[in-house]
Amino acid sequence: MSRTTYTCHCGAVIQYNHDLEKESGTVSRNWNCADCGTRVPSTIAERIQHQHPS
Protein backbone atom coordinates (compact mmCIF):
# COMPACT_ATOMS: atom_id res chain seq x y z
CA MET A 1 0.00 0.00 0.00
CA SER A 2 1.41 3.36 -0.97
CA ARG A 3 1.65 6.32 1.36
CA THR A 4 -0.77 9.19 0.98
CA THR A 5 0.64 12.71 1.01
CA TYR A 6 -1.01 16.10 0.69
CA THR A 7 0.62 19.44 0.00
CA CYS A 8 -1.11 22.27 1.85
CA HIS A 9 -1.54 25.78 0.46
CA CYS A 10 1.19 26.94 2.84
CA GLY A 11 3.66 24.50 1.27
CA ALA A 12 3.73 21.97 4.12
CA VAL A 13 3.78 18.34 3.04
CA ILE A 14 1.32 16.40 5.19
CA GLN A 15 2.07 12.71 5.36
CA TYR A 16 1.82 11.62 9.02
CA ASN A 17 -0.64 11.91 11.88
CA HIS A 18 1.47 14.53 13.69
CA ASP A 19 1.12 16.82 10.63
CA LEU A 20 -2.63 17.05 11.29
CA GLU A 21 -4.69 18.72 14.01
CA LYS A 22 -8.26 17.71 14.79
CA GLU A 23 -10.62 20.65 14.77
CA SER A 24 -12.11 20.94 18.25
CA GLY A 25 -15.76 21.55 18.96
CA THR A 26 -17.08 19.64 15.96
CA VAL A 27 -19.19 16.51 15.88
CA SER A 28 -17.69 15.18 12.66
CA ARG A 29 -13.97 14.76 12.15
CA ASN A 30 -12.42 17.83 10.58
CA TRP A 31 -8.66 17.88 10.16
CA ASN A 32 -6.42 20.91 9.68
CA CYS A 33 -2.80 21.46 8.70
CA ALA A 34 -0.70 21.62 11.88
CA ASP A 35 1.39 24.47 10.41
CA CYS A 36 -1.23 26.94 9.19
CA GLY A 37 -4.64 25.59 10.23
CA THR A 38 -6.02 25.19 6.70
CA ARG A 39 -8.59 22.40 6.41
CA VAL A 40 -7.36 19.18 4.82
CA PRO A 41 -9.92 17.23 2.74
CA SER A 42 -11.44 14.58 5.01
CA THR A 43 -10.87 11.61 2.69
CA ILE A 44 -7.16 12.39 2.50
CA ALA A 45 -6.87 13.22 6.21
CA GLU A 46 -8.48 9.91 7.22
CA ARG A 47 -5.87 7.99 5.23
CA ILE A 48 -2.98 10.10 6.56
CA GLN A 49 -4.20 9.80 10.15
CA HIS A 50 -3.35 6.08 10.15
CA GLN A 51 0.18 6.53 8.76
CA HIS A 52 3.11 6.50 11.15
CA PRO A 53 6.75 7.26 10.37
CA SER A 54 8.70 4.02 10.44
Image (cartoon, rainbow, N blue to C red):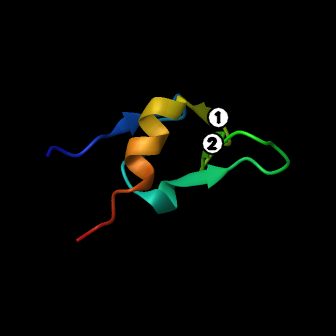
The residue to which callout 2 is attached is 32
Q: What element carries label 2?
A: strand
Kind of residue at disc 1: Thr
Q: In which quarter of the image is residue 36?
A: top right
Report if residue 26 is visible in the image: yes
Report if residue 14 is visible in the image: no
Q: In the image, what residue occupies the spot 45% across and 53% down?
A: 49
Q: Report x, y in % for residue 48.
A: 39, 47
1 and 2 marks in contact (CB < 8 Å)? yes
Q: Report x, y in % for residue 17.
A: 46, 58
Q: Report x, y in % for residue 24.
A: 79, 51
As drawn, 48 above or below 8? below
Q: In which quarter of the image is residue 13?
A: top left
Q: Residue furthest left?
A: 1
Kind of residue at disc 2: Asn
Badge 1: residue crowd in 10 Å (few <14, some 14–19, many ≥20):
some
Q: In the image, what residue occupies the spot 66% across and 51% down?
A: 22
As drawn, 20 above or below 7? below
Q: Specify whether 51 is left or right of 46.
A: left
The residue to which callout 1 is attached is 38
**Cα distance, mark 1 to mark 2?**
5 Å
Q: Report x, y in % for residue 25.
A: 85, 48
Quadrant where the C terminus is found in the figure: bottom left
Q: In the image, what residue occupies the spot 46% across and 31% down?
A: 43
Q: Residue furthest front?
A: 27
Q: Earlier in the sequence, mark 1 or mark 2?
A: 2
- Of residue 32 and residue 47, the one placed in the foreground of this image is 47
Badge 2: residue crowd in 10 Å (few <14, some 14–19, many ≥20):
some
